[in-house]
Amino acid sequence: MSTESAAAITGDIAIALSFLAALGFGIGQVRSANRDRRERLTIETVRAMQTRQLAEHFQRIGSQDLPSTFSALRALPADEQVSIIHYAQQMEMLGLMVYDGMIELALVERTLGDYVGFSWEKYKSFTYDRRKEDPYLNEYFEWLAKRLDDYMRSNPRTPAYATTGAQSELR
């Protein structure tokens, strides 16, 4: 084998190895960017759920019954209708994000717990009534409530106050 042939083969191998290294680095960067994007979305979702407006709705829904029909909902004062509809939209979007794998169901369980299911029980009567015209109304809200209930039954956890420390310390 001539020196030129050996140099050409060595050059080809170096180019191939450089390509593989660049490909590996690129894949790592894409994975890191996806993880960062998911973490930012999770943080923003949690922040969006921690508003005074949502707390007021939690209080309202816990202390009174919601209408059983859509027409009864429409008979409420406008500000109450807006609050009820806004909360349903938040739960719908949260359910859609869990459904699409954008945020984890475990996070919803840890931040809202069974309140999603409690809320769904209050909402389902007038939602089912309205689904006669719109079969997709609150579909991801309902899906999330059912999925969360199943998850909580099959994955019971010890409350944080009853554990010895942060989960991150255990890693």
Image (tube, rainbow, N blue to C red):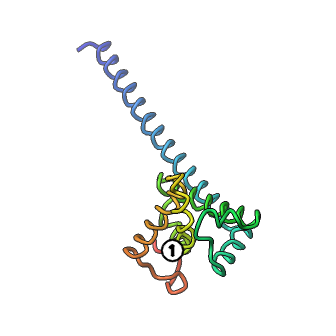
Judged left or right of residue 87, residue 141 is left
Q: Residue at x 52, y 57 (%)?
A: 131
Residue 47 visible in rendering: no
Q: Residue at x 69, y 76 (%)?
A: 60
Residue 65 visible in rendering: yes
Number of other residues with Cα within 10 Å of mark 1, as a class: few under 14, some 14 to 19, many 20 or more: few
Residue linked to disc 1: 169
Q: Residue at x 45, y 40 (%)?
A: 27
Q: Residue 1 location in percent, x, y?
A: 23, 15
Q: Residue furthest left?
A: 1
Q: Nearer the viewer, residue 70 or 138?
A: 70
Q: Nearer the viewer, residue 145 or 80?
A: 80
Above or below 53: residue 1: above
Above or below 164: residue 17: above
Above or below 26: residue 60: below
Judged left or right of residue 12, residue 149 is right
Three-letter residue code for mark 1: Glu
Q: Nearer the viewer, residue 117 or 20?
A: 117
Q: Residue 9 location in percent, x, y?
A: 31, 20
Q: Secondary structure at mark 1?
A: helix
Image quadrant occupied by the C terminus: bottom left
Q: Residue 135 location in percent, x, y?
A: 49, 53
Q: How many marks?
A: 1
Picture quadrant of residue 153: bottom left
Q: Residue 13 location in percent, x, y?
A: 34, 26
Q: Residue furthest bottom?
A: 162
Q: Residue at x 74, y 70 (%)?
A: 52
